[in-house]
Amino acid sequence: MTSFFRKKTTITFLGIIGFITLFVLFSYLKLAIKPVEPLKKNPPVIERGSIVDRAGQPLAIQTNYYRIGLNTKDIRLRAEKDASFKQDFIHDMSIALEMSEDEIASIIDSRRDEFVYLKKRVPQEMYRETHDVTTSKSYSFVSYEKEVGRTYPNNSLASQLIGFYGADGKGLEGIEFSQQDILSPPIDYTKEVPEQGKNVYLTIDANLQYKLEQIALKAKNDTQAESIMLVAADCRTGELLSLISLPSANLNEYGTAPLDARMNKPVVYAYEPGSVFKIFTVGLVHDERGISPNDTFLCDGSYERKLSSGETIRIKCLDRHGWITPREALKYSCNDVLGQISDKVSDTEFINRLKLFGFGSKTGIELSGENPGLLKNPSSKSWSARSKQTIAIGQELTVTALQMVQAATAIANDGVPVKLSVIKKITNKDNSIYYEHVPEQKDRVLSKASADYVLSCMETTASTGTGSRANIGDVQIGVKTGTAQMADPVKGGYSDTDFISNCMAIFPTNKPQIVLYIVISKAKGETYAGRIVAPVIAEAANTIIDYMGMSREGADSIEHDGIINIAPARSVKIDNVVPDFYGYSKKELLPLLSQQKVNVKINGSGWVTSQNPIPGTPVTENMVIELNLE
């Protein structure tokens, strides 16, 4: 024993034990005197604001969804006692969740003895039906998790503009994305009362948007086009009254929509506009005093200019127009004369003027992903001896539909463009104003005389030129059409089959209010814009004029005392029988969406014109009431 416990070894061992003991005591003492941290509170609930149209009609509202899951071990244990249990359970759930039996079986078998979700983002009515089944059949192992979600009452209406709310609680595209912090403010733990989400009022009118979307959809189907864009703006305020990009996606099924249907083309798609661009060329050269209305130019079928190197530049024209004025050059869409007109200003003056119109830069609209387009500089390596003349007729540059509309507001607004906007106002939860759109005029780009001259030329084009099919007779309208070859991504150069067909309209020309622009991409068969786009412009313009109550020549007028009595909103209640909903507005019907006893489906916008089942039908549990609005 004495030889084992040597003095030096014993002292070392006891020293180590003592050090460890002191360290432990010190650690406990440190913890003992440390103030107790308060338990973290659950994050406050932030209600996401709604997105509505300019009149307050809901386009995106908060709702609840459910995740339905189970532990597959429970299925296995119950199945060991009852051989038919698993198949009975799969059958019942497939009906309630509207899934195939094979799909549910695959989910259960793929995760043995683990928790799995059978379905996510289950809407309220499907949750109620599923919950009733699991309760009545004693499927106590099925669990339900509530999650805050988003519902879009109008499905695909203005879908790319509104955008989409993701499963992570954040907007992914459109206004839902760009206004994320407005719709759902970040949590500020220093505030006793959390800031709630604000409501965003868009500038579009949902009813007008619906009418124009139907027109655009018919045009797309008639021309078998790949896509179509339509933008209508109030040229005085810059507010977009309609923004359409087809194909579009159902926002309630956005996750499964193809990428092309989710793309907001007027914002992100850049293309060569072709002859529509000629209105800006004539406007800027006229403003630079390079041309006057009475000047004449000879069109002999092609623009030609011989360079000092001996090379000759040639740009073909569609016809031999002879001696014509700038007005007639726009009327006939003459490439030859437009090339000659562009020669009246220097390369630098030409490009700088186009930059003032906004080409080559973003409009700054309240949406993400905006494409600035492409406008060359004379100093760039890609600039050639024919670049100015080619740009003058709408090639060798790219633009977006928004850029074209904003530039056109300068022609409609006495030479001063107006910044475009899609947000009318933003309100707090108590309906007080947080933000209100104020028209923002940009720097003048044309004199009033030059703007008026171009507008009168566009009116001539509508009455007797390439845009005559856009003429609407009793309202003065100015138009310019354009058909441009698209780039061939495989062979390079321009395609022989793919075209951009577009048309710009401003009306009424005596006192402009609306800029309307339509672009049809890759139409099949006829592609000439004067034949396939101009008629759509006429139909859309007539719809806007009638919807906004704009005056027409020769229209009957009546006297009115100016007093309008607005009936109070009617309450909607479903008791034992189905009520008569005829004439109810969509806004009045919204409370029905939270009904527990029945499921209400609302189709379209406006007011109820038909319903199924008919009024007086006895109400039964989980009855589906379908209301069609126009």
Image (tube, rainbow, N blue to C red):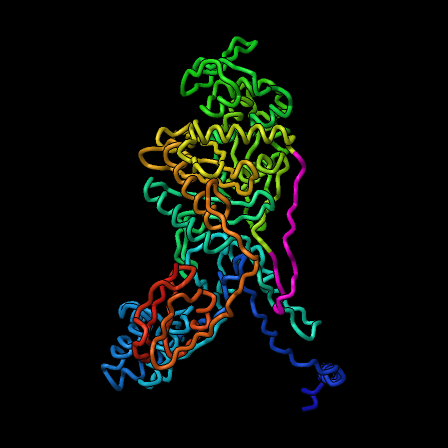
Depth order, front residue of 594/558 = 558
Residue 71 in view of the camera? no
Report whether 405 appears left or right of 73: right
Report whether 78 appears left or right of 12: left
Q: Residue at x 36, y 62 (%)?
A: 609
Residue 509 in view of the camera? yes
Q: Residue at x 56, y 25 (%)?
A: 282
Whether residue 22 is situated above or below residue 384 in the rendered picture: below
Residue furthest to the left in view is: 84
Q: Which image quadrant: the N terminus?
A: bottom right
Residue furthest to the bottom in view is: 1
Report the number of discs: 0
Whether residue 254 is in magenta: the answer is no
Tell me the chief SS of the magenta region.
loop
Magenta residues span 425-444
Q: Residue at x 40, y 60 (%)?
A: 253
Q: Residue at x 58, y 50 (%)?
A: 366
Report whether 474 appears left or right of 27: left
Q: Position of residue 310 (x, y in %)?
A: 52, 8
Whether residue 435 is in magenta: the answer is yes
